Image: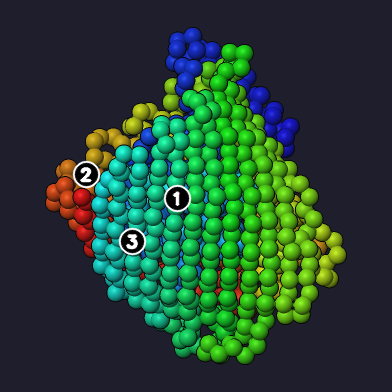
């Protein structure tokens, strides 16, 4: 694969040399031209050059959502908002606090393989198993931008960054008071208040948000409270210190999963045996940050953080299953740091960056069988610590004004111990050794507004939960699963009028493993060698003032190339819950300065429910939402949104080993809102 990528890059460079030389002769590709591989949904405001650890130094497919789209969104959870972005698959369980998640690049959101590194303001925000509970801490009104980085060539992150990363950036700085209240279908009430106060060299930013909803389905009441604060202190022009604190709590019922017959007869019903199902969740996140510019060429960025998750869930999946109590207690703390230098070496512009991170985890996972929340027997009591540390180096070389070459290398190490308190046994971590991840990106700038790019790299997957440890009867250390991926693409931008990007990508894995989601031990199963590939196409146009149109379509396929020896019949089968087609798009029109009308949609094709590919294909969906906002004056803005405009039936479906189980999504629903800005 390395030889193929190198040959392709060489061929691409050779083919473009005449055009690049011509562009240089006519000063159409100036020395400062930026390689741009990003695509934007909404307005993105660039305030300053990115410091150390910035995605500006990554030459892969990057998508950003602006505050104008995020802050006026009417969504149950922020993962739905990210689902509007190109190439993103949303898995909507619609089960209380277990709402859902997003995924990309041919990985699903089932929870057995979680392939996206989630960050909030640059702080790692995955749980031990890679899930994304911390995403619920952020409400839309407090979002400045959302950034999704796809592929295997970004060296900044290791753990969970199998297919890429996503960073939710909240508001910072400024003086403002912004409030938004809404009321909608299914007895939904939501209030958000965000405020900023900037005086001299000190900034304060706050969020208070609360949501109460009865839910589309019976037995789906949920209450959510989120509090957060950011404080910043500038010591002169070159030193910025920050503090971040977040607190979140939720209490929700779960409507459960329906049989096929019940889901079609009455999608809003719940089962009698789910009447005591529900969850309480408490989360906290704290961080200290420091950004220091030693000169206009050298800067340093670091953060220390602490995450706490407490989750207590009662769930019964089907009539024939027992109710379970699942108690999760996790404390994660870590350090991130990066040093960035840019300058000239022998007349050639060069950027050099070194960075790394260490995360320590203290996790406890307990489970019981229960009847109406009364425990009958304990099935799990596990205590396990996990340490994951990584170090990377990256360079950007500009041997010509039209050429960027970005080599990088990352190495990760894993440590930890496991204790099974039910039988008083322990186990060490698998000896994963040093996990080496070379990476290379190339961008060519043949003309103003045009970026041709290609990248190649490796990421990794390790076992999570008990699957990371050498637990008997296993006697051989499990090797990490290495994902090797590459991408070629082209981006064109004509000022603010037109933007388009197309990319083809592939990603293969050795020894891929998947968590057994309902296993008492929390063990894994061997999927085998896998291959994922796809094409992403995005475009946006602003033909006139007040009119914006954008759309994205992605094709993907995920298959098992070399199956586990236990299931040789799965060779060539598709990986479960991975639709071939994903699409999203939207139109925003302002016929008058005070009025904005929007229509957006998203959809996907159907998917198999298991790697056996034997239960039929399910999950196809097409959903449109419409909204209107009207500004009465500089202070008051009124909004009206209709989601699932056509009242289409769509659902999440899974296979429990004997039958399909269905979670119907929300029908048509209406939300009215008022936003006040001061």
Q: Residues within 10 Å of mark 1 (few under 14, many from 20)?
A: some
Name the residue nearer the viewer: 174 or 614.
174
Whether label 3 touches label 1, CB < 8 Å = no
| Residue 376 visible here | yes
Can you say whether 224 is above or below 272 in the image?
Answer: above
| Residue 106 visible here | no
Name the residue nearer the viewer: 265 or 589.
589
Q: Which residue was labeled with disc 2?
A: 590
Q: Residue sitting at 70 percent across and 28 percent down?
A: 7
Tell me the distance, in whole angstroms, between the alpha carbons under discs 1 and 2.
Answer: 39 Å
Q: Is residue 146 left or right of residue 610?
A: left
**In this rendering, the label closer to the viewer, 3 or 1:** 1
Q: Position of residue 654 (x, y in %)?
A: 56, 71
Q: Residue sitting at 43 percent across and 71 percent down?
A: 250
Tell me the distance, in whole angstroms, between the alpha carbons under discs 3 and 1.
Answer: 17 Å
Q: Position of residue 258 (x, y in %)?
A: 49, 79
Please state, as top left, top right, bottom left or bottom right, where the N terminus lies in the image: top right
Can you say whether 144 is above or below 604 in the image?
Answer: above
Which mark sits nearer the N-terminus, 2 or 3?
A: 3
Circle 2 SS class: strand
Q: Which residue was labeled with disc 3?
A: 208
Q: Which residue was labeled with disc 1?
A: 243
Q: How is the image coloured?
A: rainbow
Whether label 2 touches label 3, CB < 8 Å = no
Q: Residue sitting at 38 percent across and 61 percent down?
A: 227
């Amino acid at each position: 694969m390395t030889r193929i990528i190198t040959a392709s890059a060489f061929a691409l460079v050779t083919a473009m040399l005449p055009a690049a030389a011509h562009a240089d002769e006519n000063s159409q590709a100036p020395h400062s031209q930026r390689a741009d591989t990003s695509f934007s949904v909404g307005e993105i405001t660039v305030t300053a050059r990115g410091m150390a650890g910035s995605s500006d130094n990554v030459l892969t497919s990057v998508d950003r959502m602006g505050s104008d789209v995020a802050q006026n969104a009417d969504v149950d959870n922020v993962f739905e908002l990210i689902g509007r972005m190109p190439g993103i698959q949303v898995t909507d369980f619609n089960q209380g606090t277990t709402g859902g998640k997003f995924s990309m690049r041919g990985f699903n959101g089932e929870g057995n393989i979680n392939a996206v590194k989630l960050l909030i303001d640059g702080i790692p925000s995955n749980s031990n198993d890679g899930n994304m509970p911390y995403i619920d801490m952020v409400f839309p009104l407090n979002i400045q931008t959302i950034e999704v980085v796809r592929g295997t060539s970004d060296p900044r992150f290791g753990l969970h960054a199998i297919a890429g990363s996503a960073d939710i950036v909240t508001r910072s700085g400024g003086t403002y008071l912004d409030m938004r209240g809404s009321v909608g279908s299914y007895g939904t009430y939501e209030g958000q208040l965000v405020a900023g106060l900037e005086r001299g060299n000190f900034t304060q930013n706050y969020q208070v948000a609360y949501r109460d909803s009865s839910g589309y389905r019976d037995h789906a009441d949920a209450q959510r409270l989120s509090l957060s604060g950011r404080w910043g202190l500038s010591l002169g022009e070159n030193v910025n210190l920050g503090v971040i604190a977040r607190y979140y709590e939720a209490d929700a019922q779960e409507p459960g999963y329906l049989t096929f017959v019940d889901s079609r007869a009455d999608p809003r019903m719940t089962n009698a045996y789910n009447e005591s199902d529900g969850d309480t969740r408490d989360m906290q996140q704290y961080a200290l940050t420091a950004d220091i510019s030693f000169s206009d060429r050298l800067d340093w960025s670091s953060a220390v953080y602490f995450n706490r998750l407490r989750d207590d869930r009662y769930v019964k999946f089907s009539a024939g299953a027992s109710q379970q109590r699942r108690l999760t207690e996790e404390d994660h703390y870590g350090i991130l740091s990066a040093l960035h230098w840019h300058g000239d070496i022998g007349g050639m512009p060069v950027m050099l960056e070194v960075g790394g991170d260490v995360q320590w985890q203290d996790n406890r996972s307990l489970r019981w069988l229960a009847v109406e929340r009364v425990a009958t027997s304990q099935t799990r009591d596990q205590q396990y610590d996990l340490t994951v540390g990584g170090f990377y180096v990256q360079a950007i070389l500009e041997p010509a004004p039209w050429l960027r070459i970005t080599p990088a290398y990352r190495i990760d190490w894993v440590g930890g111990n496991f204790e099974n308190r039910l039988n008083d046994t322990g186990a060490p971590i698998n000896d994963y050794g040093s996990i080496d991840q070379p990476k290379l990106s190339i961008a060519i700038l043949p003309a103003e507004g045009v970026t041709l790019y290609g990248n190649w790299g490796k990421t990794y997957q390790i076992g999570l939960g008990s699957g990371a440890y050498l637990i008997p009867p296993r006697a051989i250390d499990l090797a990490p699963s290495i994902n090797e991926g590459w991408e070629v693409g082209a981006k064109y931008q004509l000022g603010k009028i037109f933007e388009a990007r197309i990319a083809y990508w592939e990603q293969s894995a050795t020894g891929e493993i998947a968590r057994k989601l309902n296993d008492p031990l929390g063990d894994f199963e061997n999927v085998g060698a896998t291959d994922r590939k796809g094409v992403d196409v995005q475009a946006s146009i602003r033909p006139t003032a007040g009119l914006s149109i954008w759309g994205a379509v992605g094709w993907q396929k995920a298959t098992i190339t070399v199956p586990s020896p236990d299931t040789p019949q799965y060779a060539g089968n598709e990986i479960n819950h991975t639709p071939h087609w994903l699409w999203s798009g939207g139109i925003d029109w302002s016929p008058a300065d005070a009025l904005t009308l929007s229509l957006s949609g998203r959809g996907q094709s159907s998917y198999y429910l298991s790697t056996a590919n034997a239960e039929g294909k399910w999950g196809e969906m097409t959903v449109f939402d419409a909204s209107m906002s009207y500004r009465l004056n500089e202070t008051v803005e009124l909004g009206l949104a209709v989601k699932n405009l056509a009242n289409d039936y769509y659902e999440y479906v899974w296979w429990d080993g004997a039958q399909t189980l269905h979670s119907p999504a929300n029908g048509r629903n209406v939300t009215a809102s008022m936003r006040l800005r001061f």
